[in-house]
Structures are given as C-alpha cells and as structure tokens.
Image (cartoon, helix red, strand yellow):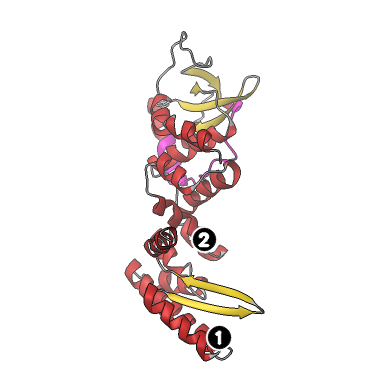
Amino acid sequence: MNDDISKRRLGRGLAALIGEMDQPIPVDDARPAVSADRMTPIEFVSRNPRNPRRHFDETVLQELAGSIRQHGIVQPIVVRTIGTGRYEIIAGERRWRAAQLAGLVEIPVIIRDVDDRTALELAIVENVQRADLNPLEEAMGYDQLIEDHGYTQNDLGEIIGKSRSHVANSLRLLKLPEPVRDMLADGSLSAGHARALVSTSDPTSLARQIVAKGMSVRDAERIAQNDIRGLSQVRQAVTSQTKDSDTIALERSLTDRLGLDVSISHKGSGGQLRINYKTLEQLEEICRLLEAR
C-alpha cells in the first residue's frame, strides 16, 4: 500500500469521524453536500453486505424494538447513497433491524458520501468500539480490509486504537477449522480458548473437549501446549532418522543460541532453515536480530 495514501487515511481519524456522524453537517460546510437527520422510508434503506457483523441476537433485537416503539430511534442510522433515493447502512444495522420489528415506516438517517473502503472502515471501527462483533467477525473484518484495500496490521492497529499484536492474534483465528469457528461465533469458545488451539494437531477435538468440560482459558492453553509439545517430539523423531549427525548438531547449536526450536533440511545443494516461535514477542526478537545484521 502506498505510504502517502496510508498516512492520509490514518490522518483522517476514523474514530473522530464516527463521532461526527451523530452531528448534522452545516449546509455551508466545504465538504461534499450531505443531509442530516432526514426521515426516509425504511424500505429504501438496505444493509451493507460488507458489514463484518453477521450475528444479531434475536432477544436483544426484540428488546430494542420495544424501546423504539416507545421512544423512537434516538440515534439516527448512518447511511450512504447507492442510487436515486436509496441508501446503504454504514452504521446502525441493529437499529434498522429493530425498527423493522417495531413496524416503523420511516427512520431518521444521516447521509455520508463515502466510498466502499471508507464505509467498511467505519463499519468495523464502529462495531469494535461498541464491542458489537464476536471475535470471528472482528477477524473477518480485519482480513477484508487487508485483502481488499491493502492495509497492514499496523494500519489497522492505529485505526481501531489497539495494538498490532491484537490484530495479529485476531487474524490467527481464521486459521481454525470451521467447527471451531462456529463454536467461537456462537460464544461456546472465547477468543482466548480459540487462540490456544490454532497450532494444535486436532483443534476440533480439543475444542469439543474444552466446551464439554467447561475448561478455563488457562486449562485450554495447558492441554494445547501438551498437544503441540507431543506433536513436535513426533516430528523430531521422524526427521532425526533422516538427518546426519552434523545437521542435528547444528540444529541443537542454533536452538541453544536463539532459545527457539530450529530445524534444518537439506535438498540437493540447498535446503531450508526453519525457526519455530510460539509468541509474537519471540517473532519480534527474531526480526530484531536479523535487522541488526
């Protein structure tokens, strides 16, 4: 991604823009013309298919619908124009859904003139700040910004006000098999439980065991580490049968120096050197050592 574009994007302050979205923009403002607090037929408003949020609790929606019947929609829904008289939601899909349940014919909207990228940015930031996304939805939102719009993990960390390691740990959840992701999405597993399972030999079986026994995150990390350690020992036993003593000695020497598991495999006149790390801090230390050379 172009650095200048990234800086301009970050410089805009999406969190601040979300704050602005609840306030009407004056007519004489120099920015693109928009309308604020306009009432529009609810059928002219549609959801954003790129919204990372997928799950909406039916009980919560019914409670919100009851409140809307009594008090109306207190906070307008933020939308963008997608055609003549038609709008797509940027922020406020839950209010829009509850308004439908409440039988509202018209809803208040604030219109913002933004492109696909900015609409996705705003949707993710708004949901993260409100803690409205489950861990899997959050990870999918980050992945979509990276894949579709060239963000780096550092970019995302600055935008959402969290560390790069938080973003990286969220993205790791997408490596889990579908059954585990389903348990994460429905709340059976927490993000802490799920992260512990990413590098295990059978995440699905371990996840079911964790849920069935009601294990804590610490317990999950313990059984995961035992699984990873056993898997590593099996791999070492297999590879050691095909490696000469000099290669094994070099592996041990590098392992002792780095404090990390190192494996070497020869193929013809070349080969592969692999350094295994368990935490992002260990990865950062490896990068620091390489950059110092």
User: Relative to 282, does residue 139 appear above or below in the rendering?
Assistant: above
Q: Which residue is mark 1?
A: 239
User: Relative to 164, does residue 112 appear above or below in the rendering?
Assistant: above
The answer to whether one can see residue 238 in this image is yes
- Percent position (x, y) of residue 229? 43, 80
User: Relative to 207, does residue 184 appear above or below in the rendering?
Assistant: above
- Percent position (x, y) of residue 218? 32, 69
**Is residue 199 found left or right of 282 in the rendered image?**
right
| Picture residue at 65% right of the left edge, 77% below the top | 269
The answer to whether one can see residue 96 in this image is no
Q: Quadrant of the N terminus?
A: top right
- Percent position (x, y) of residue 184? 47, 59
- Circle 1 residues within 10 Å: few <14, some 14–19, many ≥20: some
- Circle 2 residues within 10 Å: few <14, some 14–19, many ≥20: many
Element type at mark 1: helix
Residue closest to the eye, 62 or 9: 9
Residue type at mark 2 is: Arg
| Picture residue at 43% right of the left edge, 37% below the top | 126
Circles 1 and 2, Cβ within 8 Å, touching? The answer is no
Residue closest to the eye, 69 or 218: 218
Q: Quadrant of the C terminus?
A: bottom left
**Is residue 35 found left or right of 220 in the rendered image?**
right
- Percent position (x, y) of residue 49? 60, 40
- Boundaries of the magenta span: 43-65
Q: Which residue is mark 2?
A: 181
Query: Residue 54 lies in magenta, yes or no?
Result: yes
